[in-house]
Image: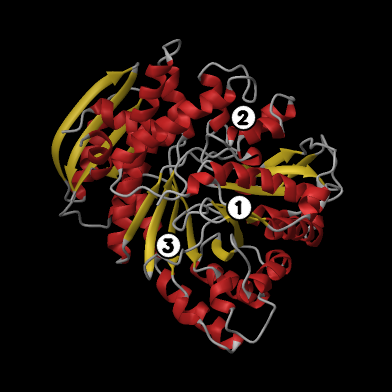
Amino acid sequence: MITPFEVVETIRMIQEENLDIRTITMGISLRDCCDPDTDKACRKIYEKIVNKAEKLVKTGEAIQKEYGIPIINKRISVTPISIIAECGNTDNYTLFAQTMDKAASVVGVNFIGGFSALVHKGFTKGDRALINSVPEALSTTGRVCSSINIGTTKAGINMDAVKEMGTVIKKCAKLTENQNGIACAKLVVFANAPEDNPFMAGAYHGIGEPETVINVGVSGPGAVKSALQKVKGADLGTVAETIKKTAFKITRMGQLVALEASRRLNVPFGIVDLSLAPTPAVGDSVARILEEMGLEVCGTHGTTAALAVLNDAVKKGGTMASSHVGGLSGSFIPVSEDEGMIYAVNNGFLTLDKLEAMTCVCSVGLDMIVVPGNTSAQTISAIIADEAAIGVVNNKTTAVRIIPAPGKKEGDYVEFGGLLGSSPVMKINSASSSRFIDRGGRIPAPLGSLRN
Amino acid sequence: MRAVLTVIGKDRIGIIAAISSILAESNVNILDINQTIMQDIFTMVMLTDISKNKESFEVLSKKLEKKGEEIAMKVTLQHEDIFNSMHRI
């Protein structure tokens, strides 16, 4: 029998250290929903989502009760809408987003991802229409998330798209200026976007995915921090080993929930995403893990090295715990969603430049960064270009989710509420990058991509 | 189906009686009991067979939680697989 010590350890991880399943995300292919008539296409999309995901929320809740593990979010990802809407008779895809929103609300999920386009090498007609529709789509819906992939290691970086996205992000902010530009929090610009990521706002159902699939994202920064508190002063090899063991346990739980959800919904199991995802709650912070490793405040010298240890150990521990690992699988560092990061920015220890360096060794990128409202579109594009370069050259996923908060200046404080949290407005470099961004074109794929 | 019942709190008279009477009412068999004092806190772990349980998992779980509140203990009922998957390869 399981020993009382083990039982209590599990219960403590859940009840005191905020261990949870962050999301069960159902991927749904919409490839059979294309129709030249937009209304018909939208009807097909609505019916398919509602039909496939009908039992998702109820099943998630039942698993939560039986296993006693909180499952925070139930979500849906769909095929990039640029592909589905392309054969239609309209250039405005807002109606597609509104259809997704309605379907999401009917089945009770809080976010639906896939208002997306993959333009790393260039645009199709549908890609252009989708990107142009993003500001209106995100400002007239509550649950829809959008992602645009503008670069891959194989294709290089589409700098025309990078330029375009700076403008799109500014428009998103403008259209939701009375809510601090919240539409931008639902828009991610990716390089090397994964097709099976269960986390929002970047989830979409990739074109290589099956008809439907269950992907699960685990969490548990609190459990990792607590495990590290027991090895105070030990060398970094011991630290890595401790993180690995904790990540293993966390991921085993994710695997169990994923298989159970897959069985009950009769939908194939895709992957478990090993990411450590923080929330604004105290005790659920990635920054605090880095501080437990010995940094006075997250963002000081040594932060990148500490994050590298954490990210690598999480992967090593998690890989063995799950039969299929995928998605982003690493450590998230979303500023506004992490209590420790917010503290570090507020007190001047964590800067945008340091965050950029940290994205070289963690799973995603500049995530939930709030910058002054008067930041130019070109500067935002340049921030995206920097991040994309890190991803493309280093063969990893990077992303930018940035909010130029309307009317706010450096040092102001912005509140988004819920899981999106709150954040101080960060300082950006005031020198212009516009002549670089205005060049456009494509940055060639790096030498490292020539592996055949 | 087997489930693990955990009772955590300050030691007092009648904990096992209170919990096991509910289990008997619901037709749940106790397979194993282990109790210990962990860091000054009373901890009881019971392995139960709930396959002949009269009500649903949820109803039983709520009844136990409520009884736990009455005797100032934290009572949790969980499918045993969560512990097996976390602690056994």
**Residue shown at the point (49%, 44%) measured from the top left:** A448
Q: Is residue A180 left or right of residue A245?
A: right
Residue A206 seen = yes
Quadrant in the picture for residue A264: bottom left
In the rendered structure, the answer to whether residue A401 lies left or right of residue A231 reads right
Q: How is the image coloured?
A: secondary structure
Residue density around tag 3, few if under 14, some if 14–19, many if 20 or more, within 10 Å: many
The part of the image, by quadrant, that contains residue A17 is: top left
The chain under label 1 reads A
Looking at the image, residue A158 lies above or below residue A338: below
Crowding near pointer 1: few (<14 within 10 Å), some, many (20+)?
some
Q: What residue does disc 2 label?
A: A340
Mark linked to residue A444: 1
Q: Which amino acid type is marked by label 2?
A: Gly
* Residue A16 in sight from this viewpoint: no
What residue would you read off at disc 3? A26
Q: Could you confirm whether marks 2 and 3 are on the same chain? A: yes
Q: Please state if A234 lies on the left or on the right of B80 as rendered.
A: right
Label 1 – label 3 distance at C-alpha: 35 Å
Instruction: Indicate the chain on which mark 3 is placed.
Output: A
The CA distance from mark 2 to mark 3 is 31 Å
Tag 2, which secondary structure?
helix
Q: Are marks 2 and 3 in contact (CB under 8 Å)?
A: no
**What residue appears at the point 42 percent right and 35 percent down from the top-left corner?**
A15
Viewer-nearest residue: A52 or A312: A312
